[in-house]
Amino acid sequence: MSNELEAFLEYISITRALNAKSVSAYKSDLLFIEEELGKPLIKLESESLLKLLAKFKNKRTLNRKFSAVNAFFDFCYKQQFKNDITKLKFSKIPKLLPKFLTSKDILASLDLIDRTSWIGLRDYALILFLYATGARISECLELCREDIEGEWLKIRHAKGDKERIVPVAQVSLNAIEKYLEASSYEKGPIWRNYKGTKLSRISAYKITQKYLGVSPHVLRHSYATSLITGGADLRVVQELLGHASLITTQIYTHIQKQNLKETVDVYHPMRNYKQEV
């Protein structure tokens, strides 16, 4: 490992206080380049770097390595290890539209759940809750009874430690109550496994996969999609989802536009008009 790379890793670890996982990722990416090309990273030219990194076909993986290299060279420039700064241009990644299910698909799958046992009642209540609140699975798994007040849910363990309050459909609350009545719940996290301990993310994933064939996060997208197609304001959806920036919520605008087009196609008087040539 070159002295400059060692200094950079010390800088991001101590001065910038990045977590161990991030530091390890930087080290892995940058050390790989030095070892592959057999030279200190600071002495490498952009052409050599690009030729090496071209082997990574996944654009997200490639951009992660570009980001690490750019951060390293920026550090070297500011520390006056280099007289100029090298910037690798990120590869363009096509925007992926969020996958979602329609309410018809979700409700049809819910009807297939056997609710004669507390496990079945739990699975039914969990899926219904995720779709009714748009909560992240991490937020959902921390849910305690005291977090629900009337028809309102207080999400305490939100991303970025930002609490928020969202309304919950009564049908979801009723499902939770029936599940809790059938289980041996006393206090603490509501969602439990068959051993009576807190449900894990993996178990929650298996539940939604079993009945819907998707991850829990798709139910969050489905919640947002249902609101947008129903005419909800984008800023309201932002608040309900707990997005720090409206930019994040704007991934759903394509759904709004598509819904508008379909509405015009169905209801506008010109829909059946055929121009004679």
Image (cartoon, helix red, strand yellow):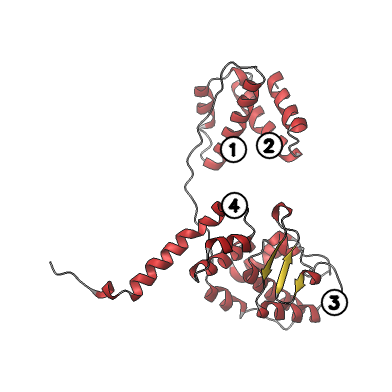
Q: Residue at x 58, y 64 (%)?
A: 236
**For residue 168, which quarter of the picture?**
bottom right
Q: Earlier in the sequence, mark 2 or mark 1?
A: 2
**Relative to 192, is 236 on the left or the right?**
left
Q: Earlier in the sequence, mark 4 or mark 1?
A: 1
Q: Earlier in the sequence, mark 4 or mark 2?
A: 2
Residue on which disc 1 sits = 64
Looking at the rendered structure, the kind of residue marked 4 is Ser
Q: Are marks 1 and 3 in contact (CB under 8 Å)?
A: no
Q: Disc 2 and disc 1: Cα gap in Å? A: 9 Å
Which quadrant of the rendered structure holds the N terminus? top right
Please state the horizontal and vertical placement of residue 68, each as a whole percent of the image: 62, 32
Looking at the rendered structure, the kind of residue marked 3 is Ser
Residue on which disc 2 sits = 25
Residue on which disc 3 sits = 184
Residue 202 appearing in the image: no
Q: Nearer the viewer, residue 89 or 127?
A: 89
4 vs 3, front mark: 4
Q: Nearer the viewer, residue 88 or 246?
A: 246
**Relative to 228, is 162 on the left or the right?**
right
Residue 40 got which mark? none
Q: Secondary structure at mark 1?
A: helix
Please state the horizontal and vertical placement of residue 245, each as a whole percent of the image: 59, 52
Q: Are marks 4 and 2 in contact (CB under 8 Å)?
A: no
Residue on which disc 4 sits = 245
115 to 28, vertically: above or below:
below
Label 3 environment density (alpha carbons within 10 Å; few <14, some 14–19, many ≥20): few
4 vs 1, front mark: 4
Q: Residue at x 56, y 65 (%)?
A: 224
